[in-house]
Amino acid sequence: MATSEPARTGLIVMSEGLEGVIAARTILSDVDGEAGRLVIRGFDVETLSRHRTITDVAHLLWKGFFDDLPDTKALQTRLGAARKTAFE
């Protein structure tokens, strides 16, 4: 039976739900659960999905992690070649 009071397990106090739980720290995104928003690098995910290509979003996510990350147009060409190779 579920209870709203924390359950005690040894020395660990566990609460129900995920309120206040940080699963991981990241520079990429922010989740505002109360408002139902996911923000990636400062852009609302709904805006990205409506107005940007998958290549644009991949570039946004990978920027700063790869020293040799090509510009978006070159990345699109490389991803296209990789898809072609994967399905040959």
Image: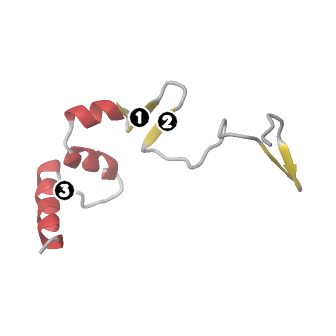
- Residue 60 placement (x, y as % from top left): 29, 45
Instruction: Specify few, some or many for label 2: CA neighbours under 10 Å numbering under 14, 14-19, or 20 or more.
Output: few
User: Which residue has dot 1 on it?
Assistant: 39
Give the secondary structure at mark 2: strand
Tell whether label 1 touches label 3 (CB within 8 Å). no
In the picture of the structure, the residue carrying the numbered disc 2 is 31
Asked whether 6 or 57 is in front, the reply is 6
Task: Determine whether label 2 and label 1 are within 8 Å by CB.
Answer: yes
Disc on the earlier residue, 2 or 1: 2
76 versus 20 height, above or below: below
Which three-letter amino acid code belongs to the residue tagged 3?
Pro
Disc 3 + disc 2, Cβ < 8 Å: no
Quadrant location of residue 7?
A: top right
Cα gap from disc 3 to disc 2, whole angstroms? 28 Å
The residue carrying pointer 3 sits among few (fewer than 14), some (14 to 19) or many (20 or more) residues within 10 Å by Cα, namely some
User: Residue 57, how many percent across, how many down?
Assistant: 27, 45
Amino acid tagged 1:
Val
Q: Quadrant of the N terminus?
A: top right
Q: CA distance from mark 3 to mark 1?
A: 24 Å
Q: Residue 62 appears at what percent x and percent y?
A: 32, 53
Q: Residue furthest bottom?
A: 88
Task: Give the residue furthest to the front.
Answer: 1
Q: Residue at x 17, y 56 (%)?
A: 75
Residue visible at 76% across and 41% down?
15
- Residue at figure coordinates x 20%, y 32% from the top left: 51
Instruction: From the image, tell me which residue sits under label 3.
Output: 70
Work out whether mark 3 precedes mark 1 in sequence or the reverse, and give the earlier one.
Answer: 1
* Quarter of the picture holding the C terminus: bottom left
Q: Give the amino acid at mark 2.
A: Val
Question: Could you say which is closer to the camera, residue 37 or residue 67?
Answer: 37
